[in-house]
Amino acid sequence: MDAVQLAWLIGALVFALWVLGAYNRLVSLRTAIGQAWARVEEPLRLRELDATALVQRLRTQLADGHSTLDAVVATQAQLHADLTALRGRPLQQRAALAALVAHDIACTEALASLHAAVQADPALRSDAHLGATLAEFVRLDARLADARERFNEAGQAYDRAIVQPLVGISRSVLWKGMDAGLIDGLAVNGSAWLARGLGWLGARLQTGQAGTYAWVLVIGVLGILGAFTLR
């Protein structure tokens, strides 16, 4: 094995190791995102169950709060639809993820209004079981805040390692190099420059003088004869 073959072999080995490391890194990042999302999804599901039970209980006890209860039900239904659409793959369904964030904010506001309505009713405010349920919502909100932060960190790490390099390569190589440089620059603009140049040359040859045309004809005939003579 000569030096060139050895260099190729070493290069191929280094490239294979790089590909293996990149794949392992991708799998690790996707696993971290999945685990972080599971921490977000669990308290959302628990809050949905608790909110459904709470609304059913307060329908008859909170006479003036039916609009607030309806808002809780509506936002929970939207969150449930968002979670179903995401199917545990938040980065592949970014539109559904954005909708979930907006509906989660609306749900939190609706639950806060419900909590205020309960506190304004003396009978409900003194209910120990109802107080424990409302305290559970506070704990779930704290869990959600921590889970959101961890999920955002995992998503940012994935973007830095995978998405941003791919976008940079696409912009610098595929767009600026292939599209703008090769296709637009060489193929499109190059053909336009060639047509313009041929037009300029044709305009110079089309003088309208018979003597010029005769000389071009003579030169052409001499060139053809010379080509046949040299064969």
Image (tube, grey):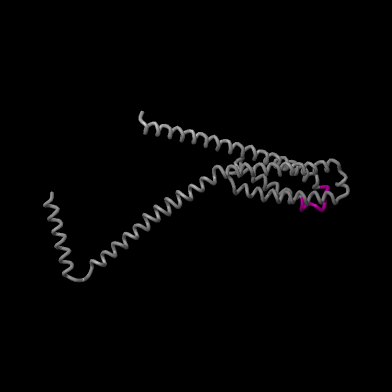
Pinpoint residue 143: horizontal percent, then vertical percent: 72, 41
Pinpoint residue 171: horizontal percent, then vertical percent: 48, 50
Residue 159 inside the magenta-drawn segment? no
Q: Residue furthest toward the bottom? A: 209
Q: Could you say which quadrant of the image residue 39 lies in?
A: top right
Residue 64 inside the magenta-drawn segment? yes
Q: Could you say which quadrant of the image residue 193 lies in?
A: bottom left
For the point 28% across and 62% down, which residue is it?
A: 198
Pinpoint residue 20: horizontal percent, then vertical percent: 50, 34
For the point 37% across and 32% down, which residue is it?
A: 3
Q: Residue furthest toward the left? A: 229
Q: Could you say which quadrant of the image residue 160 lies in?
A: top right
> Does 115 sit above or below residue 33?
below
Horizontal side of 170 relative to 112 (left or right) equals: left
Pinpoint residue 135: horizontal percent, then vertical percent: 80, 43
For the point 74% across and 43% down, which residue is it?
A: 142
Horizontal side of 176 relative to 224 (left or right) equals: right
Q: Which residue is more in the foreground, 206 or 96?
A: 206
> Does 148 sit above or below residue 221?
above
Q: Quadrant of the N terminus?
A: top left
Q: Residue furthest toward the front? A: 3
- Residue stretch in magenta: 60-68
Horizontal side of 93 relative to 19 (left or right) equals: right
Q: How many marks?
A: 0
For the point 59% across and 47% down, which residue is it?
A: 94
Horizontal side of 43 relative to 188 (left or right) equals: right
Q: Which residue is more in the foreground, 70 or 45?
A: 45
Q: Main secondary structure of the magenta part?
A: loop
